[in-house]
Amino acid sequence: MAQYTIEEAVILARRAILAAGASQATAEALADAVVAAEMSGHRAVGFTHLIDYLDGFKTGRIARNARPDITYPTPVAISVDAKDGVAQLGFDLAFKELVRKAREYGISLFLQANSYTVGELSYYTRRLAVEGLLAIATSNSPAMVTTDEVRQPLFGTNPMSFAAPVASGSPLVIDQASSATAFVNIRNAAARGTPIPSGWALDADGKPTASPADALKGLLLPFGGSRGANIALMVEVLSAGLAGGKWSIDVPSFHAGSQPLRVGLFITTIDPATVAPDFQMRLAEHLEQLAAKGLYLPGRKPRPGHVEIDEDLASQII
């Protein structure tokens, strides 16, 4: 593993994105998100996923010089057309206004359509929580999740994220897929040659499998059976239906071909100070009680001051 300072890691990512032909604005937005994913422990959507972005720029799955179109359909809503670019750029451009609206009205909405996959979904909610805001985000993705009954692609991994500000501490951040695991975890397991747990995926014949290589040819399963499928559908309605992205069954592959994905991103932002001035302190006290009982609190461990990248991976990026 090669060790980089945070600044060095951002520069490495930015240079690679620029070398792939992307604009300066795209490179800055995406590089920050990639390094943030590494620092938060979501390495599968950090530098490993950057390879997908770089290939997407070269093949045309991602517009290299996209200029998102931003409109304001209501006083509290921001609507963005990502123009086939990266999701992070549209969010960056709307961020200050999204925060301002939440503080003025108590709530604001961010709805973005026509982007590549969102990367680490908690990147968006965490940034809002740092501003003292509570945020809920959803996004859809190419259909690769099925159910035991259907055994055909129905939904994307359709992640959701929740983040809340905490008095005198880092935010509480939850980030998880509607599927039993993310596709990138299957792909990474296949690269390592390690088996996957039962209940994660089906093979090409629709049979349960512990082989990640067979899972790559098959489909993922939702977490919790029909309950997870219901969550995936809810995410789909918000991200594709309301935000305007393509339905997952209509989204092309994120790692092959040349067609843009055009998925959706939906974010609800709430200023807790407008309805519960003591919210952050009460949450801090409650989390202390839960931690004392041994509960793991996601998103609250100290972030490292450096980034470690596998040397083989770094050689693909440089």
Image: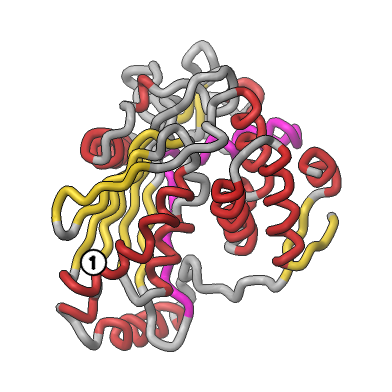
Decide: is 129 above or below 95.
Answer: below
- Seen from the viewer's position, the closer of residues 87 and 207 is 87
Decide: is 81 above or below 8.
Answer: above
| Residue 59, quarter of the rendered image | top right
- Under circle 1, the secondary element is helix
Q: Which residue is mark 1?
A: 101
Question: Which percent across, then down, holds residue 71?
Answer: 25, 47
Question: Which percent across, then down, holds residue 67?
Answer: 44, 41
Looking at the image, residue 110 sits to the left or right of residue 23; the answer is: left
Q: Mark 1 belongs to which amino acid?
A: Lys
285 drawn magenta: no
Question: Which percent across, then down, holds residue 26?
Answer: 55, 46
Looking at the image, residue 51 sits to the left or right of residue 83; the answer is: right
- Seen from the viewer's position, the closer of residues 142 and 259 is 259
| Residue 32, quarter of the rendered image | bottom right
Residue drawn 47% across the image and 29% down it: 220
The quadrant in which the N terminus is found is bottom right
Range of the magenta residues? 170-194
